[in-house]
Amino acid sequence: MKDTIKYIVDIIDIPAFVINKKQEIVASNQYFLVILQNTDISKNKELKNRIDSFVQKPERFLDTVFGQQTIKALKTITNNPKIFSLVSLLENIGYKITHLSSISIPLNFQNQILSNVLIFRIFSSKLSKVNELYMVLFDVNIIDILGNSVDRETEDVNKKYMVLLQVANKVFSTVKGFTETLILGKYRDYDLIYRFIEIIDNQVSNGIKILLSFNLSNNLGNFVFQKTNLYNFLTDLITKYSQKILNEYPDIAFEYYVQPNIPDLYTDPSKLELCVYNLLDNAIRFRDESKEEKRVKFKAFFESSINAILITIEDNGIGMSKKELSQIGQIFKTFSEKSGIGLGMYIVYKIVRSMNWNIKIESKKNEYTKVTLIIPFENT
């Protein structure tokens, strides 16, 4: 239990610490350290007394049980969505939150501000005092308070935490809901049961895919170069992808061409595959459902006039505006409800820069998008 809590506390961007029944700190994060360094919080007797009282007899404070009642109780104290997300995550991965208390205290940064401090009791699984911990959250935005003193890297960590939180919440909530339905045994229709299992499998698979992409985005600096028969490599890759389109998107016309005598390439094939898959996935995701004919075209060939290998992916989907085009490749940047979490094009751009390739994107809103990977042949 403690290891999981330590990990969660460490990555959240809310100042927090966790104590056990003996009031020993078992986890804390950098934002709580910022509070300690900038305020005299350790001398605040009112907060200390409240924590003492809560740890000794949490039953005297608000009984939230868990689930929807926890969120309902929290809404009487805070409107911070990050706290709601944190509580939902804890409950979705098996923790129970049973009692809650809050106190308003002053924090002295550049100017004195008031902060709500939330204290709640956490159980890992069974409601046993052996398993209980107490989490203390400071409902303040440290980044807003300190401005530039919190660096850009820290902000990126915060964004990554929110992505992980959203993915975990969605996967765990869906899986939990459907597994509980199956366990109750109310359904005898095997087709329906199979459909439930299929939904669970899809949610878990999508969650794993997102988390793997997330991990890849942080580990794109490691390359393994090898001489690659580009014709065989791309033909195999596109053949597999065309089967996916046929099975999952039968209304999309997918055309592909790989030049038979395209030169061999000295490259990292896994990175090239990642680029191509992300670009194809975008072409599929941003299809225009209002169009009777939906098309995606893939083409790979050697262009002697510029001594480069060109890989183009073109679709007649929803397209992009000039403003959207200018923001392509920014981490976690999304443009519509069809967008993922904003990692796909970030990964592509990071690979392109690292490999000394080029990328060109042409698009018109509601008409088309064409992406061209340009791989200089002198780099082969």
Image (tube, rainbow, N blue to C red):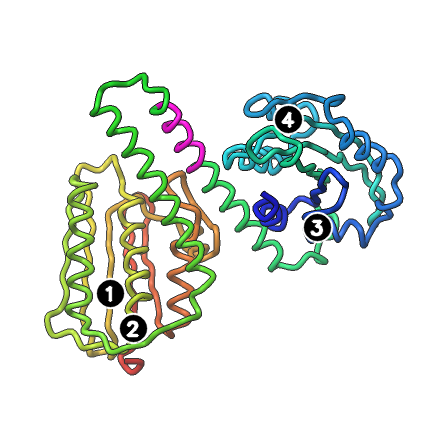
Mark 2 → mark 3, Cα distance in angstroms: 44 Å
Q: Nearer the viewer, mark 4 or mark 1?
A: 4
Please identify the dominant SS of the magenta region. helix
Q: Position of residue 56 (x, y in %)?
A: 78, 30
Q: Could you tell me which residue is drawn at 57 percent across and 54 percent down?
A: 157
Mark 4 → mark 2, Cα distance in angstroms: 58 Å
Q: Secondary structure at mark 4?
A: strand
Marks 2,1: beta carbons within 8 A: yes
The residue labelled by disc 1 is: 311
**Residue 55 visible in the picture:** yes
Please say if 375 is above or below 202. Answer: below
Mark 4 or mark 3, which has the lower sequence index? 3
Mark 3 or mark 1, which has the lower sequence index? 3
> Badge 3: few (under 14), some or many (20 or more) residues near its Cα, within 10 Å?
many
| Amino acid residing under circle 2 | Ile
Q: Position of residue 291 (x, y in %)?
A: 22, 38
| Amino acid residing under circle 1 | Ile
The residue labelled by disc 3 is: 31
Question: Would you identify the image quadrant in which residue 259 lies?
Answer: bottom left
Marks 4,1: beta carbons within 8 A: no
**Residue 324 visible in the picture:** no
What is the span of residues highlighted in magenta in the rendered image? Answer: 171-181
The residue labelled by disc 2 is: 375
- In this rendered view, identify the residue nearer to me: 226 or 45: 45
Q: Position of residue 55 (x, y in %)?
A: 76, 32
Q: Secondary structure at mark 3?
A: helix
In the image, is 186 to the left or to the right of 7?
A: left
Name the quadrant of the N terminus: top right
